Amino acid sequence: MQGHGLRTIGPLTGPRAAPEGNPLRPLPWRCHAHRMNRRSTPRSTVALPLTARDLRRDELAGCEWAGGPLHVAAVARALERAETGEVDYLAVCTSAGTPVAIGGVDFRLFADAGYLWQLAVHPILRRCGVGTALVGALEERIRGRGRSRAELRCEERETGNRVFYERLGYLPYGTVLDGWDRRLPSGEVERYETVCVTMRRDLSR
């Protein structure tokens, strides 16, 4: 998903992120991935410690799960902006160092806030708390810049995303028309437009 669209991420679990500081820092979350049987009941649980750090350019080829080649190209452009300090772009990783969630915070759009965008969690780890870890790490980057508010958009029709962000303390305050390019099964690229809900969270408390 391109532009300002936000991909589905997991529900609220665990505490807030660790204090800002080392760009490679362990987070006080563990991702709990459930193995399901044919009746969709948990058979076993695996806890994965998570670490947040800056996403590296050489990791992009392994991040197509975030939204395909068009999305990866958009992330590559965001990493170029990260070199100028306009944005921070993070990866939440397992203990093996593999990114399982990525997303950015743009500091150019608001003088007193950071704008969260391009959030994505690996499909096999959605609804395991990884999205909460990603949002928390991005919020710490906002605080580290001396800003007191986080802003984001999510598609109006994706009610699950809105519920997730509301659980994290984000409040809706309007709607806006947004859009991004997407590739069709035919290989053609079309412009996708949708109505997004604008949301914000006060980080000063």
Image: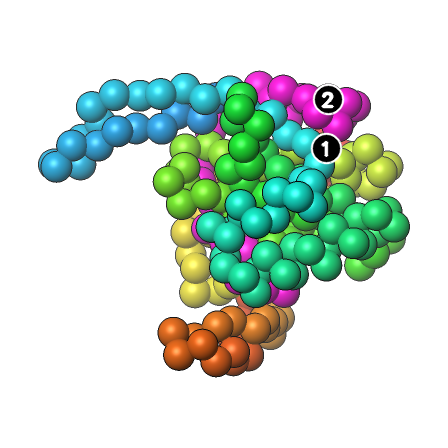
Point out the stretch of residues depicted in magenta. Answer: 1-28
**Nearer-the-camera pick, 199 or 107:** 107
In whole angstroms, how far apart are the C-alphas of marks 1 and 2?
7 Å
As drawn, the label of residue 95 is none
Observer able to see residue 126 = yes
Q: Quadrant of residue 144?
A: top right
Q: Is residue 3 left or right of residue 142?
A: left
Q: Which residue is mark 2?
A: 19
As drawn, the label of residue 140 is 1
**Nearer-the-camera pick, 2 or 204:** 2
Q: Residues within 10 Å of mark 2 (few under 14, many from 20)?
A: few
What residue is shown at x 84% (from left), y 47% (from top)? 83
> Mark 1 and 2 residues: CB-CB less than 8 Å, in contact?
yes
**Nearer-the-camera pick, 93 or 127:** 93
Q: Quadrant of residue 123?
A: top left
Q: Residues within 10 Å of mark 1 (few under 14, many from 20)?
A: some
User: Which three-letter amino acid code belongs to the residue tagged 2?
Assistant: Pro
